[in-house]
Image (spheres, rainbow, N blue to C red):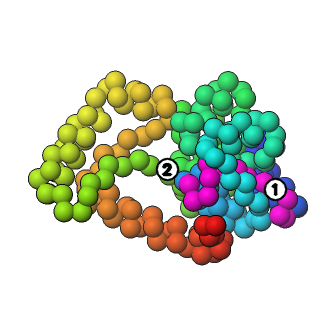
């Protein structure tokens, strides 16, 4: 298969027979695929793995049909020609894979971004939070760190704590919709 459109067409022609892997139930890679399945209006079967690595191995072996791995985990395999990237889950194409379309080009409005963030316990003094934020934002400006993130297919944001909290609330609301519509449960 060569495109997201072909994957969707195959899933619609054979509902419930297309399999997708993930790093495990409730992981970012699981929810990203569920978001895709929900948005595309297809029926696919989830195969949870004990980590992203084993799921990637089975994808390359043809044991599952698709996977929504983190770009940093899959980019090497794509560049080596061991995996075909059908689409990226950001709204725009990735600078690291310029020839791979964004899924939003097929499913307008689709977006799924994985992220890492720094958290602190409730009650941490505001001055401490502010210092960690300022120091982190400064570190993210370093050319060598930017290049390392870019090589991994990652895009550091370094947003302010209030903006980060807002983004988490908004994302939680989006996930609640997908989880409810897909009737996802932790076993």
Q: Is residue 22 magenta?
A: yes
- The range drawn in magenta is 15-27
Q: Which residue is mark 2?
A: 114
Q: Which residue is mark 1?
A: 18
Q: Is residue 1 or residue 121 the one in the foreground? A: 121
Given contact means CB atoms under 8 Å apart, are the residues at marks 2 and 1 in contact?
A: no
Q: Position of residue 135 (x, y in %)?
A: 20, 39
**Hey, which quadrant is residue 170 in on the image?**
bottom left
Q: Position of residue 7 (x, y in %)?
A: 78, 52
Q: Is residue 185 or residue 11 the one in the foreground? A: 185
Taking the image as shown, residue 80 lies to the left or right of residue 129, namely: right
Taking the image as shown, residue 19 lies to the left or right of residue 187, namely: right
For the point 81% across and 56% down, which residue is it? 18
For the point 41% across and 47% down, which residue is it? 116
The CA distance from mark 2 to mark 1 is: 24 Å
Taking the image as shown, residue 148 lies to the left or right of residue 183, namely: left
Q: Is residue 28 or residue 150 the one in the foreground? A: 28
């Amino acid at each position: 298969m060569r495109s997201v459109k072909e994957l969707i067409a195959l899933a619609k022609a054979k509902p419930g027979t297309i399999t997708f892997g993930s790093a495990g139930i409730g992981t970012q890679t699981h929810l990203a695929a569920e978001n895709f399945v929900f948005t595309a209006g297809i029926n696919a079967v989830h195969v949870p793995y004990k980590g992203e690595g084993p799921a990637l191995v089975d994808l390359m072996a043809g044991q599952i049909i698709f996977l929504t791995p983190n770009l940093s985990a899959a980019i090497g395999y794509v560049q080596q020609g061991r995996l075909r990237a059908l689409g990226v889950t950001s709204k725009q194409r990735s600078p690291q894979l310029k020839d791979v379309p964004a899924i939003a080009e097929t499913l307008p409005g689709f977006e799924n971004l994985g992220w890492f963030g720094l958290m602190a316990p409730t009650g941490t003094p505001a001055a401490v939070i502010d210092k960690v934020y300022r120091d982190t934002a400064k570190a993210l400006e370093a050319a060598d760190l930017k290049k390392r993130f870019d090589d991994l297919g990652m895009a550091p944001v370094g947003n302010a704590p209030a903006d980060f909290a807002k983004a988490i609330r908004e994302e939680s609301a989006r996930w609640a919709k997908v989880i409810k519509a897909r009737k996802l449960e932790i076993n």
